[in-house]
Image (cartoon, rainbow, N blue to C red):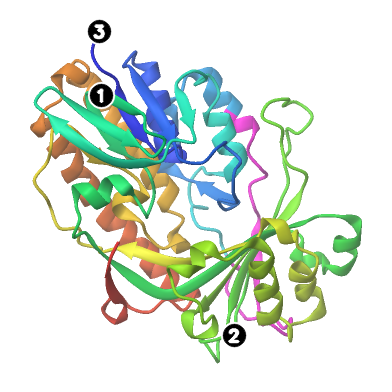
Amino acid sequence: MPLPVLIVGAGLGGICLAQALKKNNIPFKLFEQDEKSTFRAQGYRLRITKHGVDALKEALTPELFTLFEKTCADTPAIGVRIRPDGTHIPSPGGFRPAGSQSKSYTVDRSTFREALLTGLEGHVFFGKSLEQYTIHPDKVTVYFADGSTEDGSLLVGADGVRSQVRKQYLPSFQGLDTGTRIIFGKTPSTPEFLAKLAEEYRHGMSLVLDPEDPSQPCVLFESINFPYVNEIIEPQLPDPYMYWVLCTQSSQIPISREKSWHINPQESADLSRKLTSSWNPSLRAIFDMQDSSQSAIRSILSAMPEIAPWEPSSRVTLLGDAIHVMPPTGAMGANTALRDAADLARRIATAGGVEGVDEVVVGDYEANLRGFAKTAIELSWQGGMKSFGLKPVEQCERIIL
């Protein structure tokens, strides 16, 4: 019996890889540092577009893909562009959602993650924080903070932007601090909230910004509703809510990128209210009536658009934000991670399983990953500069991720 693929990180990319390996009868184990799947706020609305959809169709069984579709929210209409005082900004055709040119799905991230975990019972282990790994001629051994160890044929770091796998595999990996900070959250669509919200703000994805002063905060918001709520029992679909993400510059939020991961939800909610305190009352209601337990602040970091190649290993590789984190302004991050997962699983299966994986298989996967990530990062940057005040790459601070 071959040793399993060890996946560290039960985010969307890691779980998709697990499903694809299961579909191909390739042994695996999936480890997550959080104690449970709903341990912390991890963002809300995501758009799954062509590359992500294709990856899911390849990785999931038809039954699980149908479950995925039925857990999706309504596809958004074209929203409006408005100033903080509520006046309209002329824009031909309104504000068009990313990915609206082709078939796409709107998902609640936590619900999507729960749906992807379906059928993986016994393969997923929570409360497993990776400390290090060692490579042997015939295996890789991972060591966890609880003192346990696991042997595997291949270690896949799907553990996000602060990846412990990447820090050991590529300790000098460079990225960028964009200087942009985001606060994201959700506001329950209660009758009281809707009574304060202008009718035109209830439909589609809308953008609030000040064209005359790009240094001021901007906000994207969108109502999230689930058409199949009466058909799905597990996972339980959320009640309708307003998804929002507030973007501002680090100068407006005197919090270091390291500390931003430790700001609690109430502090994040209070900060969002402070930054929008002078806005139109109807817009301000989005923040005043938010669920303060569901807000979080993050620094927007990115890999370099041109990711430098490295010497591949037959025992370790990476996927998703662990290797190509990118600004969320192009709706490409999750889709690229899903694409990574399906591609890696396909290459392992084509090699005849984990026993056929060598430096060439891993190296080809990583080269393809870098090429696609370059395009995705550049698209994300274009969207960020156009609508969210993102600085050019050349003006961003280089950091070790």
Figure check: 371 above or below 135: below
Residue 54 in percent (x, y) is at: 40, 34
Q: Which residue occupies 66% across, 69% down?
A: 267
Q: Neighbour class for label 1 at 10 Å: few (<14), some, many (≥20)? A: many
Q: Position of residue 240 (x, y in %)?
A: 77, 48
Magenta-highlighted residues: 68-95
Asked if the residue under mark 2 is in contact with the one under mark 3, i.e. CB atoms within 8 Å, the reply is no
Q: Magenta part mainly helix, strand or loop?
A: loop
Q: Quadrant of the N terminus?
A: top left
Which image quadrant is residue 359 in? Answer: top left
- Cα gap from disc 2 to disc 1, whole angstroms: 52 Å
**17 to the left or right of 167:** right
Q: Quadrant of residue 391?
A: bottom left
Against 370, residue 299 (above or below) is below
> Percent x, y for residue 83?
66, 82
Cα–Cα gap, marks 3 and 2: 61 Å
Residue linked to disc 1: 152
Please give the name of the residue rendered at 59% of the width and 48% of the height, measured from the top-left corner: 40
Q: Residue furthest bottom?
A: 212
Which residue, given by chain and number where applicable, does mark 2 sit on?
A: 210
Nearest to N terminus: mark 2 or mark 1: 1
Task: Report helix, strand or loop for mark 1.
Answer: strand
Task: Point out residue 255 in the picture as x, y percentages from the top left corner.
Answer: 50, 77
**Labelled pair 2, 1 in contact (Cβ < 8 Å):** no
Query: Does the magenta portion include 93?
Result: yes
Residue type at tag 2: Asp
Relative placement, left or right, of 300 versus 392 is right
Dot 2 alpha-carbon crowd within 10 angstroms: few under 14, some 14 to 19, many 20 or more: some
Which of label 2 and label 1 is nearer to you?
1
Task: Report the residue marked by disc 3.
Answer: 1
1 or 364: nearer the viewer: 1
